[in-house]
Image (cartoon, grey):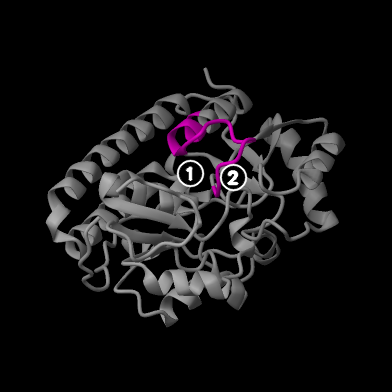
Amino acid sequence: MNVRRQHISGVALAAVTALGLGTLTACSSDSAAAGNTDKFDVVASFYPMAFLAEQIGGDHVKVSSLTKPGQEPHDLEVSAQQRAQIEESDAALYLKSLQPAVDEAVEQSGVKTKIDAAALTTLEDHGNLEDSHEHEGEEGHSEEEEHARDPHIWLDPVKYAEVAKGVGAAFEKADPDHAADYKKNTDALVKKLDELNTQFADGLENTKSKVFFTNHAAFGYLAERYGLTQEAITGLDPESEPSPARMKELQAEAKADGVTTVFYETLVSDKTAKTLADDAGLKTDVLDPLEGITDKSKGDDYFAVMEANLTALKTALGAK
């Protein structure tokens, strides 16, 4: 059975912590030392946060990412050197609940401006998809299911734009000397995200199927935004192993819903996805959760990869 998701209504733009003055330059997602430069030094937790900081900060910021290209962000452990890097920076931009080690490091640090992207939009509660299948029809749900929050908000251009607005406002407060530029850059980024949303909405409006299979449950917000249903082999954790029952259930659903493709991703093993595809007679393709850009990515930035994702979805779902 499909796990149908509730529509999220409302946007919670939360207040961003603290003021941090600094003068701000060339963008860099290099994980080398940040801090003590003539720029506004921003430490970002992983690629989607670094991309926002670079786009909004422009020439006024120096951005460093704690997660190296090709590294699976869920597994990140923060080194002593990186803790020092956070301390020396003017701002830390992170997404609470995605990387617990980063949450702890930022919370314990004395960095002037702490920007939690999860507080700038609405996160939805839902647990591991296997758990939710097991509990369907029962009155109660497991504590894990009740409290698990899907952090993959950047894969929904609308939610990502909400976060961008909050980050822009935080930069304006923290570095008021360059507030006008931050506002201008934020507006330009939001406009591009609005256009991307229109591309997805138009491209996915008329399709033969509305169901797609993924390796892990990264695309729930995207699916919800465009009237699709994501069925993940595993839950929110990309390293978890599916049960044999889940694999059989997906084989049956592929036939029932006209699913043609099992999507896997660039930073996680494709073994499970290919096993399901072989067993069910399906194709495989890449749907990139954009947790990092590598030489395997189908594009060199957020927008290019999202457009490649749209092309892959249109093909798999039989866009008319």
- Mark 2: which amino acid? Gln
In magenta segment, residue 72: no
Q: Which portion, as a residue range, is magenta?
A: 291-307
**What residue lies at 59% left-to-right and 30% top-to-bottom?**
209
Position of residue 285 measured from the top left corner of the image (x, y, whole percent): 69, 32
State which quadrant residue 214 falls in: top right
Q: Name the residue under label 2.
A: 230
**How far apart are labels 2 and 1 at the CA level?**
9 Å
In magenta segment, residue 306: yes
Relative to 107, 243 lies left or right: right
**What residue lies at 62% left-to-right and 36% top-to-bottom?**
295
Q: In this view, does 46 lie above or below 272?
A: below
Residue found at the far front of this picture: 37
Q: Residues within 10 Å of mark 2 (few under 14, many from 20)?
A: many
Q: How crowded is mark 1: few (under 14 residues within 10 Å), some or many (20 or more)?
A: many
Can you see residue 165? yes
Position of residue 49 measured from the top left corner of the image (x, y, whole percent): 42, 54
**What residue lies at 59% left-to-right and 45% top-to-bottom?**
230
Q: Are marks 2 and 1 in contact (CB under 8 Å)?
A: yes
State which quadrant residue 175 falls in: bottom left
Q: In this view, does 153 lie above or below 127?
A: above
Q: Earlier in the sequence, mark 2 or mark 1?
A: 1
Q: Residue 9 versus residue 302: which sits nearer the camera?
A: 302
Q: Residue 233 versus residue 132: which sits nearer the camera?
A: 233
Relative to 191, 249 lies left or right: right
Relative to 314, 115 lies left or right: left
- Mark sitting on residue 222: 1
Secondary structure beneath label 1: helix
Can you see residue 159? no
